């Protein structure tokens, strides 16, 4: 493709992506600012969308029964989470995974992947809600996550388009390049460092290291979702978001990053202050 053709293709791609991206960012930031029930509601809806897309991708049947059962489980887990009953929420999702897997018709492969979808949906809302619940640092921790993941995605997109080069994982995700991965990581670390500074974090080598690892993990989450789609012969999770595909296509990296960020915070500061554990070193 000529340089002019490549630029035209990118402009067309951005024209489709930008409006829906702005809308999603505005909703995410608004929900994060309010916290509490609006934040829980926002991410529960995202989990429901991801569950529907996953069940569709893996061919879970009977579709209506499986999707509806999983949706009930997710809502129940969200209610437990809103009441501060994290263990009950996690147990509900785990039992839901077993139940939905059993409910799905077909071979063991289909049942296994259907059940895995419930666990995947759990990672959409449980980790980020637990981080936001940290009264002092929850807001900044989630904004930090947004900065790392979104800038990783943006940097990866532009570096991959302009520089290209050797493929990162040609079998799993043919479009991803090493230049995009490295460029994305650079921007992700930069974004994380800026937010950490605003949060009055004790800026140190550890802060940069965590942003680097979380950025890399978000890209791994993106590659995993690509692997699942390719395994079942799908290009996009759905067509609900113009220019982006499905909800899964947009938050695959975020849920991986949020899960790792929560684990880091829990290990460092415990269940009472995971967001502080993520940002304060």
Image (cartoon, rainbow, N blue to C red):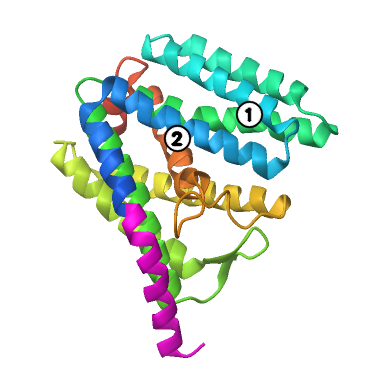
Query: Would you identify the image quadrant in which residue 102 lies?
Result: top right
x and y percentages locating residue 228 in the rendered image: 66, 47
Identify the residue under disc 2. 46
Pick the residue in front: 152 or 108: 108
Count of numbered circles in the view: 2
Label at residue 21: none
User: In the picture provided, is 214 more to the left or to the right than 53?
Assistant: left
First to last magenta residue range: 1-21
Pick the residue in front: 14 or 63: 63
CA distance for labels 2 and 1: 14 Å
Query: Height in image: 156 above or below 95?
Result: below
Q: Residues within 10 Å of mark 1 (few under 14, many from 20)?
A: many
Q: What secondary structure is found at the residue carrying circle 1?
A: helix
Label at residue 67: 1
Query: Height in image: 54 above or below 64?
Result: below
Q: Is residue 69 visible?
A: yes
Q: What secondary structure is found at the residue carrying circle 2?
A: helix
Q: Residues within 10 Å of mark 2 (few under 14, many from 20)?
A: some
User: Does the magenta stretch mainly form a helix, a strand or a loop?
Assistant: helix
Q: Is residue 281 visible?
A: no
Residue drawn at 18 percent across, 37 percent down: 202
User: In the picture provided, is 209 more to the left or to the right than 280?
Assistant: right
Q: Are marks 2 and 1 in contact (CB under 8 Å)?
A: no
Query: Would you identify the image quadrant in which residue 175 lies?
Result: bottom right
Outermost residue on the front side: it is: 64
Residue drawn at 33 percent across, 41 percent down: 145
* Sequence order check, earlier mark of 2 and 1: 2
Quarter of the picture containing the C terminus is top left
x and y percentages locating residue 56 in the rendered image: 66, 41
Residue drawn at 71 percent across, 55 percent down: 233
Query: Would you identify the image quadrant in which residue 163 lies?
Result: bottom left
């Amino acid at each position: 493709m000529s340089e002019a053709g490549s630029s035209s293709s990118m402009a067309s791609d951005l024209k489709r992506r930008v409006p829906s991206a702005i809308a999603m960012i505005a909703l995410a930031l608004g929900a994060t600012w309010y916290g509490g029930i609006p934040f829980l509601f926002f991410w529960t809806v995202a989990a429901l969308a991801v569950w529907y897309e996953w069940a569709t991708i893996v061919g879970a049947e009977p579709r209506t029964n499986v999707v509806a059962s999983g949706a009930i489980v997710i809502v129940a887990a969200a209610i437990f989470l809103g009441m501060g009953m994290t263990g009950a929420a996690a147990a509900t999702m785990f039992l839901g995974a077993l139940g939905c897997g059993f409910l799905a018709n077909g071979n063991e492969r289909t049942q296994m992947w259907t059940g895995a979808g419930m666990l995947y949906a759990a990672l959409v809302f449980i980790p980020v809600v637990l981080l936001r619940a940290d009264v002092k640092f929850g807001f900044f921790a989630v904004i930090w996550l947004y900065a790392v993941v979104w800038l990783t995605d943006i940097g990866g997109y532009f570096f991959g388009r302009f520089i290209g080069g050797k493929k990162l994982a040609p079998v799993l995700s043919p479009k991803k390049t090493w230049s995009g991965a490295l460029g994305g990581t650079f921007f992700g670390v930069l974004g994380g460092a800026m937010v950490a500074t605003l949060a009055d974090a004790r800026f140190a080598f550890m802060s940069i290291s965590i942003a680097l690892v979380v950025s890399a993990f978000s890209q791994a989450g993106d590659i995993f979702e690509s692997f699942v789609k390719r395994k079942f012969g799908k290009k996009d999770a759905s067509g609900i978001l113009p220019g982006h595909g499905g909800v899964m296509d947009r938050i695959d990296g975020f849920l991986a990053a949020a899960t790792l960020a929560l684990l880091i915070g829990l290990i460092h500061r415990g269940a009472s202050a995971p967001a502080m554990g993520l940002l304060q070193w």
